[in-house]
Amino acid sequence: MGFFNNSNQSHKNTKSDSTTTIITAGTKITGNINLSCNLYIDGYFEGNINSEQEINIGKKGKIKGEITALRVIVQGLAEGSINATRVDIKPDGKVTGSIESEEFVIEAKGIFEGNSLVKTSLSEKLKDKKEDFIEKEDIQ
């Protein structure tokens, strides 16, 4: 897991062929959203967002609430909790709250205020359990 990254490269595993829902600047939405596609926000959203894909908070975007997605990219402001496989805080992006992810990257000039929890994938958990089991057997 990387905490700080000064690279400008994007994560290569993002699906770029899926549909993207856009909330433009000047739009204010309150409620809950469930998506099977990408979401790009440059407006204001308050509530819970669940996406099977990527959520990208643009430079003018602000989200207040709970976010659950495959990947979350923050260029604007996110307040609340984020649960994703990967979270990227870009330059001038800010997250206040909690983050639970397998990969967490804060680029130069990105801001994070809160708590983070590293999730491990199932294969890593199984590998760790196997190593613990082998070590315990060797001791006896």
Image (cartoon, rainbow, N blue to C red):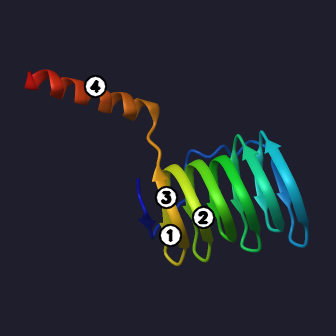
What distance separates the C-alpha of mark 2 from that of mark 1? 18 Å
What distance separates the C-alpha of mark 3 from that of mark 2? 9 Å
Q: Nearer the viewer, mark 2 or mark 1?
A: 2
Give coordinates of residue 140: x percent, y percent.
8, 21
Camera-side residue: 64 or 76?
64
User: Which residue in the protein does label 2 denote?
Assistant: 97
Crowdedness near tag 4: few (<14), some (14–19) or many (≥20) residues, C-alpha within 10 Å? few
Q: Earlier in the sequence, mark 3 or mark 2?
A: 2
User: Which residue in the protein does label 4 denote?
Assistant: 130
What distance separates the C-alpha of mark 1 from that of mark 4? 35 Å
Residue 43 placement, left or right of 122 = right
- The kind of secondary structure element at disc 2 is strand
Residue 20 placement, left or right of 129 = right
Q: Nearer the viewer, mark 1 or mark 4?
A: 4
The answer to the question of whether label 4 and label 2 lie on touching residues, with beta carbons closer than 8 A, is no
Q: What amino acid is at disc 4?
A: Lys
Q: What amino acid is at disc 2?
A: Gly
User: Which residue in the protein does label 1 denote?
Assistant: 107
Quadrant assignment, res 62: bottom right
Please report the residue visible at 54 percent of the width from the left and 51 percent of the height from the top.
100
Please report the residue visible at 70 percent of the width from the left and 40 percent of the height from the top.
52
